Image (tube, coloured by chain):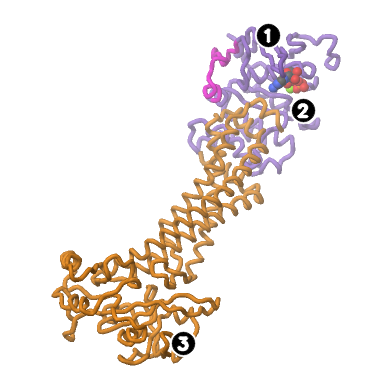
Chain colours: A orange, B purple
Amino acid sequence: MDLMFFYSLRNLLTRRLTTGLTAAGMALVVFVFASIVMLAEGLKKTLVDTGSYDNVVVIRRSAVSEVQSGIERLKASIIETQPEVAIGEDGRRLLAKELVVLITLEKKKSNSPANVIIRGISGSSLELRPQVKLSAGRLPRPGSSEIIAGRSIVKGFKNVGLGENLYFAMRPWTVVGIFDAGNTGYSSEIWGDVDQFMQAFRRPVYSSILFKLRKSSEFESLKKKIESDPRLTLEAKREADYYREQSEMMAKFLRILGQSLTIVFSIGAIVGAMITMYSAVANRTGEIGTLRALGFNRSSILVAFLMESLLLGLIGGFSGLFFASFLQFITVSTTNFQTFSELAFSFKITFEIIYKSLLFSLVMGFIGGILPAFRASRMNIVEALREQ
Amino acid sequence: MAPVIEIKDLTKSYRRGSQSIVVLENLSLDIEESEFLALMGPSGSGKSTLLNLIAGLDKADSGSIRVRGTDISSLSENGLAKWRAENVGFIFQFYNLIPVLTAFENVELPLILTNLSRKERKEHVTTALRLVNLEDRMEHYPRQLSGGQQQRVAIARAVVTDPTILVADEPTGDLDRRSAEEVLGLMEKLSSVIGKTVVMVTHDPRAAKKAGNIKYLEKGVLANAPQASFPECI
Ligand SMILES: Nc1ncnc2c1ncn2[C@@H]1O[C@H](COP(=O)(O)OP(=O)(O)OP(=O)(O)O)[C@@H](O)[C@H]1O
Ligand SMILES: [Mg+2]
């Protein structure tokens, strides 16, 4: 049946303008679909890469994230003394009591304000996050008003260059270093000494405790122990899970947004394909009569026209994906709804996105083509032949 | 030997609004093996209607058409399509080639309904195109061919499956004198040399003369000679 395939394909290529326009409509829909899913995927990847599996985050029970959490000093020291906490080479525990607050900074491009995560770090904060590397300047001295800023913050916000002063919590802070945490959420944070921040923000409690497990397998028992301790009212999560959960709501939102947009757009594209195919059927009535006379049955005609429409969809699908794939080179910054802070991430294409987009374009081709193909297959032969 | 086509008491009417017009009424006709029959008659007399019934494109109201013993009026829609693919070669007034396919592919088209291999198909197509003297135009698209050449490609397409009957509705109606002669010569050769049964509808007395047998259809009745009201053929 390869001749019938060429028949369908060449008919599409012969009417270049209508094929081009119809496919462009479909390409646009696939582009929107793919780009939003790529955005959700990029966000997920950024957040999932942020956490390590062997690290544990402890926050107040029922706090959605570190931002809403609070841990009193006494509770913090109970966690600190758990035997499951790993001990570093220098004999100190690999544990960091941290403070997370949001401040507003002005964006470079839009001049509009956006929330930024300020993280007060202590002890082993850096050791616990090997993906964080100082790329310029130095680390802040403990007890000073010095801060270091993540790569994406330096890129996207004003007054955060090396050596510049930033004013928040009623004090100026000097940027003494810039760190790079790759494509993780940390690149969108500002770090400084935890005690300085607690003073400046008048916050008597920590937000979270991060530590490394002595043995990864001890997590479940430790979690049970912490969560059932009536003095604590705390919750323990593997750091990787903590960030995965954070990505879920946003990714879900993007997915729903993507789906509703594509459904609305795809109706337009399907109607376009339907009009194109109906006119193809009308223009080729005589041809359909000829094929039927030669012995092609109704289903062959149906298949030929449906194939044409599916190919049309596929052309749209491939072009939409082609343009969407360029988005990978773009980094965007948006508000993470879980923490209400700004997060930078890139579009990411996956095999699943590719095949789903193509499948989607085929579905559009099918829905647009089925009625016209049906009409073509139901034509009366003699009447069709009369039409020349 | 029994006739290839046996038509008995054929009646066909068309409904136009509330009234129905009888086009063919109790028509009977036998067509012999290798016969080249020309059907003539005034416009609207039902020549095309009869030809379409013989070719299995349309269904009669009553009566029967047997082709090599098969009663085609009893076949289902799909059965009829399959029967046409195996038994009928079509030659149309406007050639009806598929514009997006080359001459070769147009001739190959009916063969994809058979279970011939690709190689066998190629052989058949080449033979058919050689028969109409268009081997050197295989890769040309219909729009690159003259009317006469297109009609010869159509003849190749009609014979490539080696059908039982060839039907032609005014095959020279759109051609100049020379091309028409070529096409008629080919059709004559198909019946006399290869032994095909050919039924041709025509308005052109010169074309009809090429046929071995001429029948006149008028007011639903077949006759061997034209009636007075049909002077153009005398
Ligand atoms: N689908 C149809 N619906 C209604 N009437 C039809 C239909 N097809 C044919 N007719 C009528 O049947 C009659 C015979 O038509 P037909 O096409 O067979 O004539 P013809 O002899 O081939 O004429 P011509 O020489 O002009 O081609 C005509 O009166 C025509 O109007
Ligand atoms: Mg006619």
Q: Which residues are magenta?
A: B64-81
Can you identify the residue that label 2 sits on?
Answer: B173
Can you identify the residue that label 3 sits on?
Answer: A161
Q: Position of residue A8 (x, y in %)?
A: 57, 42
User: How far is disc 1 from disc 2 in space, using C-alphas?
Assistant: 26 Å
Discs 2 and 3 carry the same chain letter: no
Q: Quadrant of residue A293?
A: top right
Label 1 marks a residue whose chain is B
Q: Quadrant of residue A43?
A: bottom left
Does the magenta portion include B65? yes
Q: Residue at x 51, y 58 (%)?
A: A321
Q: Residue at x 73, y 16 (%)?
A: B46
User: How far is disc 2 from disc 3 in space, using C-alphas?
Assistant: 86 Å
Q: Earlier in the sequence, mark 1 or mark 2?
A: 1
**Does mark 3's beta carbon lie closer than 8 Å to ligand 1?**
no
Label 3 neighbourhood size at 10 Å, few (<14), some (14-19), many (20+)? some
